[in-house]
Amino acid sequence: MPRKFTEKKLVIASHNPGKVIEINDLLGPFGVEAVSASALNLPEPIEDGETFIANAELKARAAANGANLPALADDSGLVVPILGGDPGIYSARWAINPNRETKDFDLAMKKVKQAIEAKGENPEGQSAYFACALSLSWPNGDIETLEGQVQGRLTFPPRGTKGFGYDPIFVPINYQLTFGEMEQGEKHQMSHRAEAFQKLVTRCFR
């Protein structure tokens, strides 16, 4: 039987401000007080899993143990089939810029475009999807993990400043706007994270 969430406080096991805001918005209707791992000065664990699920679970467990509170962790990324699934679980690493202290997703989006061009293909309109694994862990080791995806295509140059990460180059199927151009409310209705969260709500919050 899945474990139901009955507590009033949890840790969002992320140091990514965009993810923290998005997950906080999703948690809003449930009256849960959420605090980020960065606010608690929890260290970021080494993400050495080989799947989104493995990385989400190790982050959730590390935060739950570190804070002695339930913790919700997300591992997500952009998957481009023509690149063999890259950047995938390495999506954040593609944004590492040795000349900056913060991640540089402008650089990461350029890398995606250049990698597709290096294969002799046109980056515009290439099939892609966002994948998300969402894990809810308790300090005693109980854990629930759900997955979500949203299919779409790539567009260049990047458009929009409302999202984060690779949002400005991703257009979901049947839409014309990128995730970077959409209002957050609209994105929350259809994103990979929203799909995983709805599955988590059904399993653990109802």
Image (cartoon, rainbow, N blue to C red):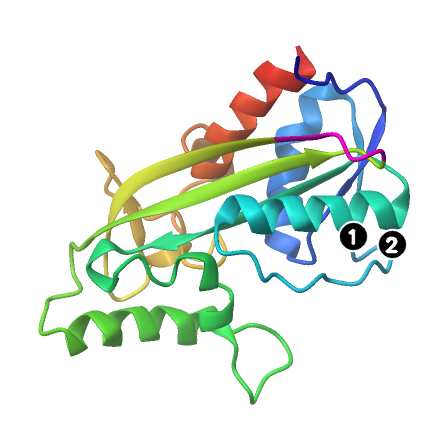
**Is 15 on the left-hand or right-hand side of 122?**
right
Residue 36 visible, this angle = no
Residue at image position (26%, 66%) is: 157
Local SS, label 1: loop
Residue 157 visible, this angle = yes
Local SS, label 2: loop
Residue at image position (53%, 23%) is: 198
User: Few, some or many C-alpha atoms within 10 Å of disc 1 (few <14, some 14-19, many ≥20)?
Assistant: many
What is the chief secondary structure element of the magenta stretch? loop
Q: Amino acid at mark 2?
A: Leu
The quarter of the displayed image where residue 61 is located: top right
Judged from this view, the residue extending furthest toward the right is: 68
Indicate which disc residue 37 carries.
Answer: 1
Indicate which disc residue 40 carries.
Answer: 2
Residue at image position (64%, 34%) is: 25
Asked if the residue under mark 2 is in contact with the one under mark 1, i.e. CB atoms within 8 Å, the reply is: yes
Over which residues does the magenta segment extend? 140-144
Residue at image position (78%, 22%) is: 31
